[in-house]
Image (cartoon, rainbow, N blue to C red):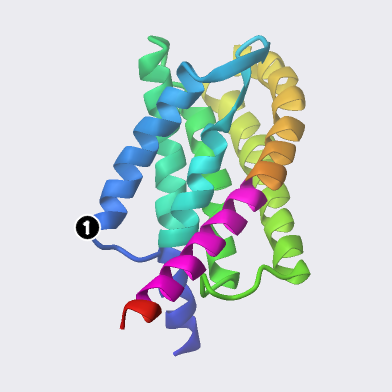
Amino acid sequence: MKFKRVMRKLAGKWKFMTFVFIIVGALLYGCLLSYGSIKLFTNTYLSFALLIPIIVGRFFGCLPAGLCAFLGSLCADLFANTLLWYDWALGSFFMGLIVGMFAFYQTDLHDKFTLNQFLYYCLTIIIGNLFGYLVVTPLLTSLIYPQQLELTLVQLSVAIPINIILQILIGSLMLLAIRIISIQRSKLKNTRR
């Protein structure tokens, strides 16, 4: 019984809005990666696209967040008119999947954003980026594009710390803002009654 509840929570909420958020989030993710980012290194950018899976994961769960990151990474490759880098896309999938696990811990938007939740959020960000981009991406690069492995590792050494810092700093403020807006909306609804 408990296992089913956990798996349902990990799979996320699948409604019409889930598909809308995945598609719109993936397109926004791709646009932000391709056109709205600052170049730091060869093919390595500082982008707010990595905040999109946090939003999707917060509202809909882990699997939708992972799918949003995966499809968004493929969209970014299409928008940039390059090859489809499936190794990076699958790394983004696992990053989004693990980052989306924060929704598993924080169940209600009206709950306080406590220190324990912030630490759990930081832990999911760190593990998600390390597993997705330091384990999955190099492993798939060595299998699919072995000649690109050295360049991928150099790019990852720049991208991973920047991704973690961006997601922790901006993402936590964004989640706090979502919580505050949700509380204000519920207060407004209660005063109208």
Tell me residue 182's x, y (percent): 47, 65
Q: Residue furthest bottom?
A: 1
Q: Main SS type for the magenta part?
A: helix
Q: Residue at x 62, y 33 (%)?
A: 139
Residue 20 visible within the image:
yes
- Residue 90 lies left or right of residue 44; in this view the side is left
Q: Secondary structure at mark 1?
A: helix
Residue 173 within the magenta-colored segment of the rendering: yes
Q: Quadrant of the C terminus?
A: bottom left
Residue 36 within the magenta-colored segment of the rendering: no
Front in this rendered view, residue 162 or 84:
162
Residue 105 image-quadrant placement: bottom right
Q: Residue at x 72, y 44 (%)?
A: 169
- Residue 154 lies left or right of residue 78; in this view the side is right
- Residue 45 lies left or right of residue 109; in this view the side is right
Front in this rendered view, residue 89 or 107:
107
Q: Residue at x 43, y 56 (%)?
A: 63
- Residue 95 lies left or right of residue 69; in this view the side is right
Q: Quadrant of the N terminus?
A: bottom left
In this figure, which residue is indicated by the disc labeled 1? 16
Which region shows up in magenta?
Answer: 171-189
Tell me residue 9's x, y (percent): 45, 72
Residue 91 visible within the image:
no
Check disc 1: other Cα within 10 Å, few if <14, some if 14-19, many if 20+: few
Q: Residue at x 38, y 40 (%)?
A: 25
Total marks drawn?
1
Amino acid on which disc 1 is placed:
Phe
Front in this rendered view, residue 147 or 167:
167
Tell me residue 48's x, y (percent): 56, 32
Q: Residue furthest left?
A: 16
Tell me residue 89's x, y (percent): 48, 32
Residue 75 image-quadrant placement: top left
